[in-house]
Image: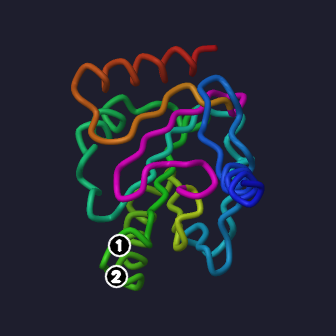
Amino acid sequence: MKKTFLLSLLLFSSSFALTLGQTPPCVVIDGKNGGKVDGTPWDSKMLKGKVYVVFYVDPDKKDLNEPFSEALKERNFPHDKYTSIAIVNMAATWMPNFAIDAKLKAKQKKYPNAIYVRDKKKVLVKKWALEDDNSDILVFDKEGKLIFQHAGQLDAGQIEKVLSLIEHNLNK
């Protein structure tokens, strides 16, 4: 009984589901776990000072929320107040890392204001309890607090809701 309780406690303490209105636990993705496309570490502490939209995506589901991505581009939010981050769950696919790396580098050149991150070991699945093998969308306010979270495809109504939420938080 004691062993089961301790194991449950250990598993619970190693991953935290995110809570709306709260700042998530700090996570760094670097080294063998991945990092930004330029080779530098990605640190969740950077999610402050702007409104951030984070896409945590299985490469096999990369097009699932394309309508939302296109809607964000159309809004053309000011880059001094808004940034998008695409974190690719590289361990969730059969595709080889070198192929994903090449695509991410090309995207980084095409969209220099976005941040592209490689998660090679499902760090955010483990640390933030994000859905594996899916498309997760997270929105953080300027203070770094989570203001929206969704796993799976957004419908048209949800897209409008998120865009309004971003706009509202840009003007705060």
Q: Which residue is mark 2?
A: 99
Q: Which residue is mark 1?
A: 103
Residue 146, position in %: x, y?
A: 60, 30
- Quick one: label 1, few (<14), some, or many (20+) residues within 10 Å? few
Where on the picture, by quarter, is residue 7? bottom right
Q: Nearer the viewer, mark 1 or mark 2?
A: 2
146 above or below 69? above
Residue 69 located left or right of residue 83? left
Residue 26, position in %: x, y?
A: 74, 49
Labels 1 and 2 touching (C-beta < 8 A): yes
Residue 92 located left or right of residue 115? left
Q: Please tell me which residue is depicted at 65% across the width and 23% down the height of the picture.
A: 21
Say which amino acid is labelled 1. Answer: Lys
Q: Is disc 1 placed on a helix, strand or loop? A: helix
Residue 106 located left or right of residue 43? left
101 above or below 1? below
Say which amino acid is labelled 2. Answer: Ala
Residue 143, position in %: x, y?
A: 72, 28
Q: Is residue 140 magenta?
A: yes
Residue 63 located left or right of residue 20? left
Q: Please tell me which residue is depicted at 38% across the width and 68% down the height of the picture.
A: 92
Q: Which residues are magenta?
A: 125-144
Q: Is disc 2 placed on a helix, strand or loop? A: helix
- Quick one: label 2, few (<14), some, or many (20+) residues within 10 Å? few
Q: Quadrant of the C terminus?
A: top right
- Asked whether 3 or 164 is in front, the reply is 3
